[in-house]
Image: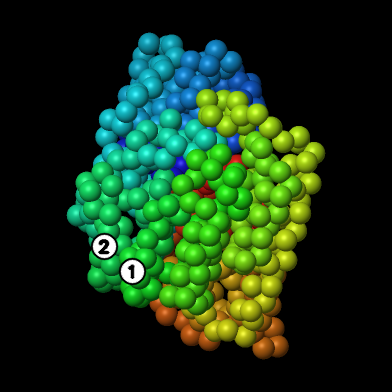
Amino acid sequence: MNVHDSERLSGLLEDAGYVRAEDGASEADVVVLNTCAVRENADNRLYGNLGHLASVKAARPGMRIAVGGCLAQKDRGEITRRAPWVDVVFGTHNIGSLPVLLERARVQDEAQVEILESLDVFPSTLPTRRESAYAAWVSVSVGCNNTCTFCIVPALRGKEKDRRPGEILAEVEALVAEGVCEVTLLGQNVNAYGSEFGDREAFAKLLRACGQIEGLERVRFTSPHPKDFTDDVIAAMAETPNVMPQLHMPLQSGSDPVLRAMRRSYRQERYLGIIERVRAAMPDAAITTDIIVGFPGETEEDFEQTMHVVRQARFSAAFTFQYSKRPGTPAATMEGQVPKEVVQARYERLVALQEEISWEENKKQVGRTVELLVAEGEGRKDGSTRRMSGRAPDNRLVHFAVGDTAAADLPRPGDMVSVEITYAAPHHLNADGPDGGSAIRTLRRTRSGDAWQARQEQPEAERRKAAVTLGMPSIGRPAAQPVGEDDACGVC
């Protein structure tokens, strides 16, 4: 969701006449930092980056620095106090104000801080600059009605606001018309969609409606909440061909007492029951999760219950987090804060177990033929290894050999290829061809590949408008990440 907000910010800046600074902050007139507040590391990185930018700005008269997102919503005036060289601070509810605030800061030559307490416009009404020609995020809701004791997001994003189904489907149809073939539906608690207008089956209906959109080949969603995950959603996933057999289902803890302290309104038995029903309906589904280690009061027995669920669920991957105390959350003042060294030791045991399971599950893929959506920028070594990369329907990352295939005959990002998996690692799969040749069995050129190619053929002046991503994470299709401590806003 943060990256999707960054796409909106990019679109707003481009709409206001800005273009990307090719060499980043060293030549930028404007630098925007879009922030997350889920983990303490985000605070440290923000102020570290601002410290670095102070000297850059001193050497570039007229340069403007803006800070937005969840940390801006939380810290408000603290940012300009600690970093008085910041020109604009804006919150999660008014990202559309950025161009006006930048102009006001320029004219008045003083910092502009504007933090709204509620959403002024739904973000989807704002311009956007999407990095990917073939995959896109579509927000179905913003905000969250849950009260998890470890999470500050509801306080910063506000109560859940749902879009009407017709608006969502119209956006998806427009994206498909532009060449997009994969859409990921976004919500802080995506499967609670419809609660604002009183339809508990709204999310399942939305998935089925996406299945009727011609040209839309892949539909994903993130992140659901176990308490709202109902059998009609499982049925919609299993019965809608373009909804992918992939599910990200946050666990957080396998211990019932810890789940109760977290104010997570499900227990181990219900969670494992959902996993069992998903696998019954979609035997090949890949299931990923979020887990917090060291929540206040967690005992060794509690932690062993988490390990038990991991063994039972056999996740294909897990985003594991060491508990991070966030001021303003109930958990921050709970008794029984677990010592750092204990948390670290448990964390390492969990990572080792999940690595083992991920590898075992990936080895089961060897010998299978899968259709990949060819991706851009997902394989760091692709150039040197004569490989390209793509995502399987279950979202596993596959690096596939292309051998000496002529450039004109290579698949493009957005095209579809089928390959046979020949090797498994814990976090990726390989498909190698015979005698070092191409692994591609079939190649299907698509409108998405055409859209990607059209972007590459744009004049240089137009391509410079492709993104305004100064120092931000790379933006593209959402990707599974290795097990490890992560700073992303993905623990809800």
The quadrant holding residue 426 is: bottom right
The picture places residue 219, in percent across and down from the top left corner, at 38, 65
Dot 1, how many residues are within 10 Å of its Cα: few (below 14), some (14-19), or many (20+)?
A: some
Residue 201 in view: yes
The picture places residue 421, in percent across and down from the top left corner, at 61, 80
Residue type highlighted by circle 1: Ala
Which residue is found at the position 53% from the left and 16% from the top?
78
Which residue is found at the position 47% from the left and 76% from the top?
280
The picture places residue 366, in percent across and down from the top left corner, at 64, 81
Dot 2, how many residues are within 10 Å of its Cα: few (below 14), some (14-19), or many (20+)?
A: some
Give the mark, 1 or 2, whose residue is nearer the N terminus: 2
Judging depth in this view, the residue of 112 and 403 nearest the camera is 112
The residue where tag 1 is placed is: 236
Which residue is found at the position 72% from the left and 61% from the top?
353
**Horizontal side, residue 153 vs residue 387: left or right:** left
Residue type highlighted by circle 2: Lys
**Which circle marks residue 205 in the picture?**
2
Judging depth in this view, the residue of 37 and 12 nearest the camera is 37
Question: Which quadrant is the N terminus positioned in?
Answer: top left
Q: Residue furthest bottom?
A: 434
Q: In this view, does 400 lie above or below 50?
A: below
The picture places residue 194, in percent across and down from the top left corner, at 27, 50
Q: Is mark 1 on a helix, strand or loop?
A: helix
Q: What element carries label 2?
A: helix
Q: Distance between the residues labelled 1 and 2?
A: 8 Å
Does the CB distance between marks 1 and 2 fall below 8 Å? yes
